[in-house]
Image: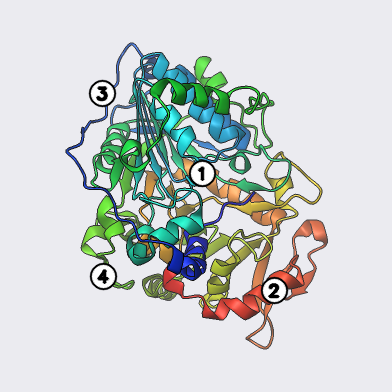
């Protein structure tokens, strides 16, 4: 099941207009003085701290390990939750009510019962129908659960939520897209994955190609500070302030046990051996003292939580709230490139400022490569309709543009379902001059630039940059089309992958007529500033 994005939520809002006559509008409750808390310092008694300390090469550097496959990324998360002894801080855009999501929630509960302080900060867009499950987790001692930018009414479905918040759309369509897991102040995971089966190769059908970084060392305190800024923000409300229930604390806990128990939540299958890239499970290597960390200077940064107030200036400027955020820092690094820039992003809708940046790089002879989803691969066809308005211009400006071949991607993922299963790109990375590597939650579209909050990590390491290039080059080589302008200078050709004989395709490849027709009829009317 592909996740829908906030732009589809915007369409749900339009549908909700029809229900306006039978729906009221709700507002957030008056906020009472809330308990604030800070990230706890690492404790020498933590086994994770001991592992991180033994590995440390230099107290001024951070250790980074890229996790390219879903099984590796899931196993690492579960091990962090199982081994936590002091504190767990989790910031998530979406935790699905599926086997993966419920397993993670249950392990958070288990950690709390061991005495671990658990703070879960969850964006409220995709919690429809999950209130009882989340309240059940929050009913346990040592657990605090806060909803970011919550919907005060219409909790049963997305349409009901937007209908009840019809005149507050300027607020509720802006979301917290950040993703981070911080354990014992010692180890963290940063990247693009949501918590759902299809981000960890746990579905029998379609799955996402994504990338995470396991991080230790000098950057960990900064990640803790970034989490605290959101946790203590006025936009993060305790779930109990938003959701009411007639169940007692004991009943909520019992209900949580039922919802996350073995009858409804089978444990994930044990991971296999080394993946196709030769990588094994990080904690197997950590326990043996041989995980190949890349040690380098790293910077973590996030947008100001107040970005959801919509106070930014137009797209072509750097708004005051953005000067220390993702867009400004990343764009400035890209603009300083001297040789090449390689981008992977599931959604690409250039802003005016990014087009100016592309022109600047072209003038300096900087090579730029972009890997994104094709129409047949994307889970957001309306976003693709905006992206394709810029494809010709991007090609004319010299960008090497690649689009995923979804039926081939499962092979490049190194596992998962085959046959008719689709692979979709979800990794959000940038490699600059093969010396600087960025990974995080930021998509190269209007929504990430101006509406959602984002979090990311920049690592100054040629070794890590080269690792990312190797991974992405494998995808381009085995599972992507290279786009080129045809001889007429207007039409686009999709040059096939070697496995398919390199055939040239005219017109969106691997896509049916219904999706083509949707884009032709609806695409031209979709406003880019809502995508």
Q: Earlier in the sequence, mark 3 or mark 2?
A: 3
State the residue lying farthest toward the top: 45
Q: Secondary structure at mark 4?
A: loop
Q: Residue at x 32, y 43 (%)?
A: 299
Q: Secondary structure at mark 2?
A: helix
Label 1 Cα neighbours within 10 Å, binned few <14 / some 14-19 / many ≥20:
some
Pick whichever, 431 or 410, lies toward us: 410
Separation of marks 4 and 1 at Cα, in angstroms: 35 Å
Q: Residue at x 43, y 29 (%)?
A: 247
Residue tagged by mark 4? Answer: 313
Does 34 appear above or below 45? below
Q: Which mark is residue 324?
A: none
Label 2 Cα neighbours within 10 Å, binned few <14 / some 14-19 / many ≥20:
some
Residue tagged by mark 3? Answer: 41
Separation of marks 2 and 1 at Cα, in angstroms: 33 Å
Residue tagged by mark 2? Answer: 516
Dot 3 and dot 1 residues touching (CB under 8 Å): no
Separation of marks 4 and 2 at Cα, in angstroms: 35 Å
Quadrant position of residue 21: bottom left
Residue tagged by mark 1? Answer: 129
Q: Residue at x 74, y 53 (%)?
A: 408
Separation of marks 4 and 3 at Cα, in angstroms: 37 Å
Marks 2 and 1: which is nearer the front? 1
Q: Position of residue 72 (x, y in %)?
A: 59, 32
Q: Earlier in the sequence, mark 4 or mark 1?
A: 1
Pick whichever, 321 or 55, lies toward us: 321
**Residue 113 visible somewhere in the drawing:** yes
Pick whichever, 163 or 291, lies toward us: 163
Does 114 appear above or below 74? above
Q: Position of residue 447 (x, y in %)?
A: 42, 63
Q: Secondary structure at mark 3?
A: loop
């Amino acid at each position: 099941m592909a996740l829908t994005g906030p732009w589809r939520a915007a369409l749900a809002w339009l549908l909700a207009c029809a229900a306006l006559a039978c729906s009221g509008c709700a507002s957030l409750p008056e906020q009472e003085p809330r308990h604030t808390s800070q990230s706890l310092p690492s404790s020498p008694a933590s086994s994770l701290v001991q592992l991180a300390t033994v590995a440390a090469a230099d107290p001024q550097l951070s250790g980074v390990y890229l996790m390219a496959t879903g099984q590796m990324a899931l196993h690492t998360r579960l091990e962090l939750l199982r081994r936590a002894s002091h504190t767990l801080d989790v910031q998530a855009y979406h935790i699905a009510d599926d086997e993966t999501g419920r397993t993670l929630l249950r392990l958070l509960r288990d950690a709390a019962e061991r005495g671990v302080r658990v703070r879960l900060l969850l964006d409220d867009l995709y919690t429809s129908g999950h209130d009882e499950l989340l309240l059940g987790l929050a009913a346990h001692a040592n657990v605090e659960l806060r909803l970011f930018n919550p919907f005060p009414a219409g909790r049963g479905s997305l349409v009901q939520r937007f209908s009840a918040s019809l005149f507050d759309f300027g607020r509720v369509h802006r979301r917290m897209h950040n993703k981070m897991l911080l354990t014992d102040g010692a180890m963290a995971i940063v990247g693009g994955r949501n918590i759902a089966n299809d981000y960890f190769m746990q579905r029998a059908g379609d799955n996402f190609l994504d990338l995470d970084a396991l991080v230790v060392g000098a950057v960990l305190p900064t990640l803790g500070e970034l989490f605290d800024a959101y946790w203590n923000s006025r936009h993060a409300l305790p779930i109990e302030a938003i959701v009411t229930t007639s169940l007692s604390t004991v009943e909520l806990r019992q209900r949580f046990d039922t919802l996350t128990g073995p009858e409804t939540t089978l444990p994930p299958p044990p991971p296999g051996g080394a993946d196709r890239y030769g990588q094994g499970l990080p904690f197997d290597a950590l326990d043996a003292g041989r995980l190949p960390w890349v040690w380098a200077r790293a910077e973590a940064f996030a947008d100001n939580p107040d970005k959801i107030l919509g106070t930014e200036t137009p797209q072509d400027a750097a708004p005051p709230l953005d000067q220390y955020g993702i867009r400004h820092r990343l764009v400035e690094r890209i603009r300083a490139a001297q040789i090449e820039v390689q981008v992977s992003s599931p959604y690409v809708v250039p802003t005016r400022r990014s087009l100016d940046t592309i022109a600047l790089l072209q003038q300096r002879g900087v090579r730029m490569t972009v890997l994104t989803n094709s129409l047949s691969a994307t889970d957001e066809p309306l976003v693709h309709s905006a992206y394709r308005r810029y494809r010709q211009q991007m090609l004319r400006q010299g960008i090497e543009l690649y689009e995923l071949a979804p039926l081939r991607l499962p092979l490049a993922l190194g596992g998962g379902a085959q046959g008719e299963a689709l692979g979709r790109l979800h990794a959000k990375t940038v490699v600059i001059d093969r010396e600087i590597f960025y990974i995080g939650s930021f998509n190269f579209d209007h929504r990430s630039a101006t509406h959602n909050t984002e979090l990311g990590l920049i690592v100054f390491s040629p070794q890590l940059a080269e690792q990312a290039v190797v991974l992405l080059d494998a995808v381009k080589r085995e599972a992507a089309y290279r786009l080129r302008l045809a001889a007429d200078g207007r039409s686009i050709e999709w040059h096939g992958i070697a496995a398919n004989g390199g055939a040239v395709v005219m017109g969106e490849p691997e896509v049916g007529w219904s999706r083509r027709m949707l884009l032709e009829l609806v695409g031209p009317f979709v406003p880019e500033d809502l995508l």
